[in-house]
Image (cartoon, rainbow, N blue to C red):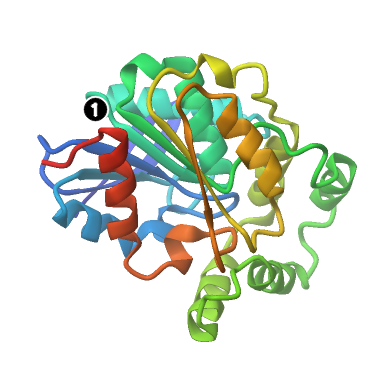
Amino acid sequence: MRADYLPLGGSLAFVEQHGEPDAPPVLCLHTAGQSGVQWRHVAPALAARGYRVVVPDLPGHGRSEPAPGGPVTDLGAYADWCLALIDRLGLARPGVVGCSIGGKIALDVAVRASDRLAAVVAMAADAHTGGRPSVRGLRRELSDVAAPSRTDRTYLGTLAVVGRDVPRERAELIATMHRREDPAVSTSDLLGWATHDLRDALPGITCPAHLVVGDDDLWLDVARVRAAAASIPGARCTVLPGIGHYPMEEIADFDAVLDDWLAELGAVRA
């Protein structure tokens, strides 16, 4: 594994890379308020399967510096940042995989640059949330981010959206890792999630696409995810039984699952 701080978008970005430089690249994006640590088990295992795996911390997340303008509320800005990262690393036709806001960012990257991608896998993401969560409520949260109970709410909220088939010990580890988030950043991310609308743009995606949703995901309406997939020419949709909002953390040996999806989409490993 190689880790670097790269100048990007006016600040330093922390980026991990796993695997050989000439292997097929896969860019892996994390969820709201979190960091590339969500891919800690998947990235090295996926690299062992023949991929060059790139795992960034988005601006203001993990070990990346904040964006110059502070917490980001526009997921389109993150999509532009990802394209700049692809350019900075010289990634030729990467697969882009993301979860939650990362999934929606992956779709936005495909909207902007399908011709530059091998495939996109968007997990726990749809075209538009339909007003969930409440934008008004999230803006109120920004004035309450210092509340001592915030980390407990993150912990309990994460447990609530982990799937029923995930062992309790694994679910508690996921929730414990998630409570490290910066609440100002995560709330801003969720504002981006709630307001970002790709409904009119998805039909323009031309690279192979796969949308994935857990049937225990309380954040998503499975019907909305199916509708988003149906609006993308040739896209697939998979509903994961017993899985919630974080497939790459909830599913043991997720690297094998993702490898199969990428292979089916034509993003062939080395």
Q: Residues within 10 Å of mark 1 (few under 14, many from 20)?
A: many
Q: Identify the residue under disc 1.
A: 91
In the image: residue 253, left or right of residue 187? left
Instruction: Residue lying at the far bottom in this picture: please name it.
Output: 169
Q: How many marks?
A: 1
Q: Is residue 180 left or right of residue 170?
A: right
- Horizontal side, residue 209 vs residue 193: left or right: left
Residue appearing at x 59%, y 52% in the figure: 33
Pick the quarter of the image with the C terminus. top left
- Residue 223: x %, y % from top left: 69, 43
149, 21: nearer the viewer: 21
On the image, the x and y values in percent for residue 59 come to 50, 39
The structure residue drawn at horizontal position 52% and vertical position 41%, both measured from the top left corner, is: 103
The residue drawn where x is 32% and y is 67% is 253
User: Within the image, what quadrant is residue 128 found in?
Assistant: top right
Q: Is residue 218 above or below residue 115?
A: below
* Of the pair 254 and 11, the residue shown nearer to us: 254
Amino acid type of the residue that numbered disc 1 sits on in the rendered structure: Leu
**Label 1: element kind:** loop
Residue in the picture at 59% in, 63% down: 244
Residue 81: give x, y in percent of width and height.
46, 27
Instruction: Tell me residue 176's x, y (percent).
Output: 55, 75
Q: On the image, which quarter does residue 227 sit in?
A: top right
Visible residue check, residue 66: no
